[in-house]
Structures are given as C-alpha cells and as structure tokens.
C-alpha cells in the first residue's frame, strides 16, 4: 500500500509530506483548493506524461516521491525481483520534472524508463477517474471490465499472441500468392538483371580497382614525364641528389678525422645516399614497365560506363552493385522455391486458425460465465444505489466469427432497464447522467473486489448522486477498503462520514504565490468540515449536530488498530 506521498514544487504545492494508512481515507476541501493536483502528482509519479507547466513558478524542478509497503503487493515484489530493482519490503518511486518539461523516473533510487514505471504502477495503484462513467459507454471498455471481472487476462493474452502470429503468417502467405500470379515475368526480369551484373565480374574486378587502373592509364603521360625528370634529379644529373650527397659524405669524412663526433652524421648521410640511389633505381624500373595501352583504356572506359549505367538503373552507388547482385539472386531463389514456401505457410495458417478458434471458444465460454455473475451482482448493487427496478445485463454476441481478430470474436454490450416493463437497451440510450454514474460506480466496486491491487483511488466517482444513495456509496467504498487501501476525493458528507481518515485540502494566500496544503483532521475538525460540506457558508448549531450524528452513526471515527497516519506540509 501507499504509505507516504511527498511533493516538492509541483504547481500550487510548495512542499507536502503526507503519510497514509490502510483502510479508507477521504480527501475534501473547497472547490479549487488543490485536490486535483494531488491526483496529478500521483498520476505523474505512476507514469503519466510530464509537462513543464507542472513546475512551480521560480522553481528549477518539480519532484514527487511515493513510498509503498509491499507486504500486500506480491505481484509488484515479483516484478521488482525480475528486473533487479527489489529493495526488501519497501519500494520508493521518484519522478522529477525539469523546467524544460523533461523528466526522469527512479525506482528504489535506480533510473528506469517510463514504460518500466508504468508496468510496476499497474501492480500497485488503480485510479478511477471522475469521468469513468463516460468511458463506460465505450465498447472496448465494457469488454475490458468483463474480462477483468472474469479473470480472463491469461487466456486473452494467449489468444492475442495466437492472433498476431496468424496475422503475420497470413499476410506473408497473401504476399507470396499474389507474387506467384506474375512469377514468370518477374523471374525473366530477375534472370536478365542478374546476367547483366554477372557479366561485369565485379567480384574479381571491383569498381574501386577498375577506377584506379583507369586513372593511372589516363595520366600515364604525366607519370612518365615527371618520373624521368625525377630520375635525373635523383641520380643522373651532374648536380643530382646522389652527387651532392656523395660530395657531402666525402667532405664530412675528412672533417671526422679531427672531430670524431661527426662520424654519426657522416653515417646518416651515407645511408641517405644509399636510399636516394635505391629510390632512383626503383623509379627507373617502374617507368620502364609503363607503356600506353589504348585498347585497355577503351575497355576500361566501356566497363566503367556500363557500371555507371547499371548503378543508375538500380538507383544505387557503383560499389553497391555486388550486394545488389546477391539480393536479386536471393529473390530469384525465393521465387523458385515459393511454391514450397506457400505450402508451408498454408499449413501454418490452417493450424493457427484452428488454435485461435479453440482459444476464442474457451474465452467466449468464460465470458458468458463471468457475465452471468457480473450482471447479477451489478443488478443487486444498482438497486441499492437508488434504482430499485433496475436490471443490468451483459450481452455477448459473435462478430464476424470466421475471421480472427484481436481480443476474440465477441462483442460485449452492457444493457440496462431502469423501469419495469421496458426492454433493456444500451447504456448510452437509456441511462441518465446520475444513473450512469451509479451504474459506473457499481461496476467499479464490483470488478475491484477480486483484484489484487493494494491501493485504489476514486476521484469524485460519486458525482451525480446524493442523500441516502451517497451514504450507501460510502458504505460500499468502506467495505472495499477492508482488504485494501482506498483513497477517495469527494464533495459528499455522506461518503466522507464513512472514511477511517479525513484529509483536508486548503489554499494559502499569505505569500505572493498561492500554495495548497493537506492535513489530517482530528475528531473536532472533522465535525466542522462535515458541517461545512452539509451547510455551506453559514454553519449553524443544527448543522454541527447533524454532522456529529452522521459521524456517530458511521464507524469511520474508529481507526483500525493495525494502522497509523500522519502528515506534514507547507
């Protein structure tokens, strides 16, 4: 469960350190006091998208820290161990947002990706937003809720994996079958293109080697002229390098008789003379082997011209032609053996198709069993929530049963009959805003009973109801908190009265920048807040008495003996 929420410089919250306990906690306050920013902070820490607007004015960054006790979260413990992020029975999540909107996420002080943070968050916290009744009208959401209630996720994962494999294989088969219809023409074209490239013999004569040879022949006149001149300068001329070095060695040898330390320099010059003579000899031998070859030059120009033509034809660089040849040969080989591959794919598609429908039939059966139980429980609950004649039904029908599709072959539709004698119709066509809110709440509470998520957050899901119905909603949420932590944002005193703990959000205008704070109310403060929620601005003695009576009739003032809570904020 969530044991601590710490916020620093996030929007209207300068600093907040809030301890939370098991059981049911409500969060109340005036409209605009900042209740939503706490849920924003929770969502941000759990993986929601970051935004530079979250950073409090004049601050460098915003930071949210969540501390969880993992004793009631075995799935989260297992996930942390799998990813080498476990740190005993405690998990600390940290999210930092900078002024430029960039953010970083940490689990147990180790940096993680946003995707990893979201995967872990799903195993720790479940948030039901105030617009949940609107998403309830979506067909995919209705199917998801039924599958969640019926614990169909493992089977659904198998079916979707089978579908994706079938879809990929089926698509490859269609491509091959389509290609086979004009296979002969394609084979002829490939054979022609391959023959063109093979005639170039680029494996033994690469483009780079041919270009180098062509460049040498094209510049042979300059090579011969300059080379012969260099031979003269190095060795043949009276003032050649060799003659100058020979004279220098002779003169220095005479001096070395008087200065022995000059012998090393004399040796260096001797070595230089030998090197210059060897260079001149090698250059002469090279020049003697060079001769103009107009026929070879013409052949090279023709081959390079063909290479450039083919590179333009295939829209590649000249040195990429060998790779293109391998690619075309591979495609031709594939076409040659495509009939064998088509047979293999047809067999795979048939087997996957059969396996898919086996899984789909099993999933449909589980959905029907789950639907029967779900509609019974929801019908009973909406009667308690002020729809005494209400009947809730889950309709499951086949949709294009022959063609595999994601999430199975069932269309799941939630129906309701609000009044006796009227046939059930889809929620969007029958339920009013208030009725839809009650049905949504009934579904959320019912589908949550079997979940292992240790912390559940309800954001004004009780909107659109009031009076005695609101009290029943509070009782349902309290009952839900018997085996998990429940945090509820509400404007209804009937719901707030059912909580084990009451947190109050208020704004502070003492500084230039508005800030919000949260504090745990004691019994006396709780009566005053309940009275405010009941009576508005003018709180009378009767209003206070009514607030005390509501709290007395509920058991919310009795704190569970195994928990404790506290808070500090600014």
Image (spheres, rainbow, N blue to C red):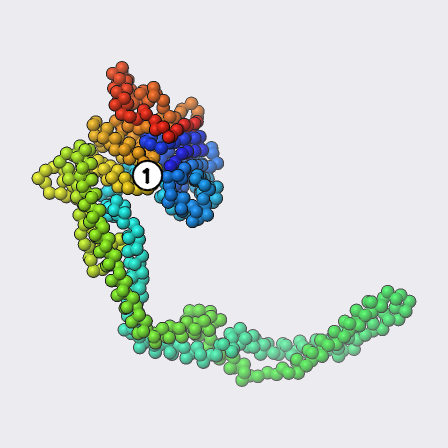
Of residues 247 and 388, the one drawn nearer to the viewer in this rendering: 388
Q: Outermost residue toward the front?
A: 561
Q: Which quarter of the rendering shows the N terminus? A: top left
Quadrant of the rendered image containing residue 88: top left
Q: Which quarter of the rendering shows the C terminus? A: top left
Residue 540, percent across and down?
A: 27, 16
Residue 58, percent across and down?
A: 47, 33
Q: Outermost residue toward the right?
A: 258
Residue 438 visible? The answer is yes
- Give the structural element (helix, strand or loop) at label 1: strand
Residue at image location 20% in from the left, 46% down from the top? 371
Of residues 6 and 284, the one drawn nearer to the viewer in this rendering: 6
Residue 43, percent across and down?
A: 37, 39
Residue at image location 23% in from the left, 37% down from the top? 442
Q: Is residue 224 left or right of residue 394?
A: right
Q: Outermost residue toward the left?
A: 421
**Residue under numbered circle 1:** 127
Q: Is residue 147 left or right of residue 519?
A: left
Quadrant of the rendered image containing residue 16: top left
Residue at image location 49% in from the left, 77% down from the top? 202
- Mark 1, other Cα within 10 Å: few <14 / some 14–19 / many ≥20: some
Q: Is residue 514 left or right of residue 432?
A: right
Residue 516 visible? The answer is no
């Amino acid at each position: 469960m969530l044991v601590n929420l710490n916020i620093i410089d996030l929007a209207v919250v300068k600093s907040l350190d809030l301890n939370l306990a098991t059981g049911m906690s409500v969060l109340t306050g005036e409209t605009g006091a900042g209740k939503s920013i706490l849920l924003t902070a929770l969502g941000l820490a759990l993986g929601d998208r970051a935004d530079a607007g979250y950073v409090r004015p004049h601050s460098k960054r915003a930071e949210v820290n969540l501390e969880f006790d993992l004793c009631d979260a075995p799935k989260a413990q297992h996930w942390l161990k799998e990813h080498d992020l476990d740190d005993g029975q405690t998990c600390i999540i940290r999210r930092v947002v900078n002024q430029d909107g960039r953010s970083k996420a940490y689990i147990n002080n180790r940096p993680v990706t946003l995707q990893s943070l979201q995967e872990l968050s799903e195993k720790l916290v479940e948030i039901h937003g105030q617009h949940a009744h609107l998403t309830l009208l979506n067909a995919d959401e209705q199917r998801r809720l039924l599958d969640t209630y019926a614990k169909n996720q493992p089977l659904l994962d198998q079916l979707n994996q089978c579908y994706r494999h079938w879809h990929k294989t089926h698509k490859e088969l269609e491509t091959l079958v389509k290609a086979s219809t004009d296979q002969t023409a394609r084979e002829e074209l490939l054979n022609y293109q391959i023959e063109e490239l093979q005639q170039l013999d680029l494996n033994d004569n690469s483009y780079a080697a041919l270009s180098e040879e062509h460049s040498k022949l094209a510049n042979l006149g300059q090579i011969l002229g300059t080379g012969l001149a260099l031979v003269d300068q190095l060795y043949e001329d009276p003032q050649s390098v060799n003659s100058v070095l020979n004279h220098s060695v002779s003169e220095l040898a005479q001096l070395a008789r008087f200065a022995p330390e000059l012998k090393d320099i004399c040796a260096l010059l001797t070595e230089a003379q030998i090197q210059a003579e060897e260079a001149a000899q090698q250059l002469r031998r090279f020049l003697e082997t060079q001769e103009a070859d107009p026929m070879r030059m013409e052949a090279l120009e023709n081959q390079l011209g063909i290479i450039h033509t083919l590179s333009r034809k295939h829209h590649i660089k000249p040195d990429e032609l060998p790779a293109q040849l391998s690619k075309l040969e591979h495609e031709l080989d594939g076409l040659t053996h495509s009939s064998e591959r088509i047979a293999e794919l047809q067999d795979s598609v048939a087997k996957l198709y059969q396996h898919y429908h086996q899984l789909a039939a099993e999933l449909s059966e589980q959905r029907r069993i789950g639907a029967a139980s779900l509609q019974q429980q929801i019908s009973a609950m909406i009667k308690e929530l002020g729809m005494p004649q209400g009947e809730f039904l889950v309709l499951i029908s086949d949709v294009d049963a022959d063609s595999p599709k994601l999430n199975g072959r069932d269309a799941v539709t939630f129906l309701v009959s609000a009044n006796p004698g009227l046939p059930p119709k889809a929620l969007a066509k029958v339920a009013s805003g208030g009725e839809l809110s009650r049905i949504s709440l009934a579904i959320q509470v019912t589908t949550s009973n079997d979940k292992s998520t240790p912390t559940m957050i309800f954001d004004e899901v009780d909107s659109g109801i009031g009076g005695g119905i609101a009290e029943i909603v509070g009782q349902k949420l309290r009952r839900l908190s018997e085996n998990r932590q429940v945090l509820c944002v509400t404007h209804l005193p009937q719901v707030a009265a059912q909580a084990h703990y009451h947190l109050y959000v208020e704004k502070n205008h003492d500084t230039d920048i508005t800030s919000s704070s949260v504090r745990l109310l004691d019994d006396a403060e709780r009566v005053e807040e309940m009275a405010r929620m009941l009576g508005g601005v003018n709180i009378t003695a009767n209003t206070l008495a009514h607030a005390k009576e509501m709290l007395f009739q509920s058991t919310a003032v009795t704190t569970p003996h195994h928990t404790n809570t506290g808070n500090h904020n600014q």
